[in-house]
Image (cartoon, grey):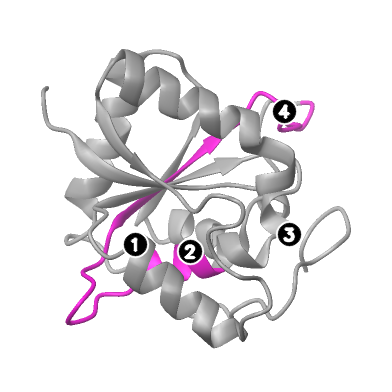
Amino acid sequence: MSIKHKTFISYHHANDENYKIQFKRLFSDIHDVIIPWDVEVGDIDPNLKAEVIRQKIRDEYLCDSTVTVVLIGKETWQRKHVDWEISSSIRDTKHNPRAGLLGIFLPSYSFLSNGTHDPKTIPPRLHYNVECGFAKLYKWSNNPLDVQNWIHEAFERKNKINPNNSYSLFVNNRTGNQWQ
C-alpha cells in the first residue's frame, strides 16, 4: 500500500512529546508512510478564549487532515486539547470534512493485569467512538506497514460509520486516575 494520509497527531504535550517525535521520525522521516501534522507547544496562545482556541485547532491544524491519531499515554485522557482535537476531527462541516480516528497505546500506558485497557483511562470521546465502531485502538508498533494500514482503515471507516460526538466538551483539563 502506498497511500499516504495527512495525519493529525493528538497527544499529551507535557508527558508524551518524545513519543510524538519518535512517531513522526519513524513514520514520516524514515518510512514516509504519513504526512504528519500536530499543534506544537507555543503555536496557539493559551490566553485566548476556549472557543477561539477550538476554532484555530479546527481551521488551521485539522482543516485538511484525513485521519487523527491519538497517542494514548497515562494521562492523555485528562487533556482538554486532546478532547477538542478529537471532537473537531470527527465533525463533518462545509469547510472541514470529517477525519478518521484511531488511538495508539504508548509504551508508557499502564494496561490492566489481564493485558486489556481500562476504558476510563483513555479520552472519553475516543472511547465512545471505539464503542460505536468509528475508531479502533492499537498497541504501539514500529512496523510502518502496520501503522499505515491502521491509518488507511480509519480513513476508510470515516464515511461508513457515524461517529459519536455527543460527549460534552471539556472545559478544563481534568485530574485523577480516570474519568467518570
Whether residue 151 is visible to the viewer of this picture, yes or no, is yes
In this view, the mark in front (1 or 3): 1
Quadrant (top left/top right/bottom left/bottom right) for the N terminus: top left
Q: CA distance from mark 2 to mark 1?
A: 8 Å
Label 4 environment density (alpha carbons within 10 Å; few <14, some 14–19, many ≥20): some
Inspect the image, locate mark 4, and give the three-letter code of the amino acid beneath it.
Answer: Ser
Whichever of callouts 3 and 4 sits on the residue coming sooner in the sequence is: 3
State if disc 2 and disc 4 touch (CB < 8 Å). Answer: no
Residue displayed at 34% across by 39% down: 36
Label 3 environment density (alpha carbons within 10 Å; few <14, some 14–19, many ≥20): many
In this view, the mark in front (4 or 1): 1
Q: CA distance from mark 4 to mark 1?
A: 26 Å
Instruction: Name the residue beneath numbered marker 4.
Output: 108
SS for tag 4? loop
The stretch of residues the image draws in magenta is 84-113
Considering only vertical position in the picture, is 40 above or below 46? above
Q: Nearer the viewer, residue 129 or 14?
A: 14
Inspect the image, locate mark 3, and give the three-letter code of the amino acid beneath it.
Answer: Gln
Residue 35 in percent (x, y) is at: 27, 37
Q: CA distance from mark 4 to mark 2?
A: 21 Å
SS for tag 2? helix
Residue 135 in percent (x, y) is at: 39, 51
Instruction: Name the residue beneath numbered marker 1.
Output: 62
Instruction: Name the residue beneath numbered marker 2.
Output: 85
SS for tag 1? loop
State if disc 1 and disc 2 touch (CB < 8 Å). Answer: yes
Considering only vertical position in the picture, is 156 above or below 145? below
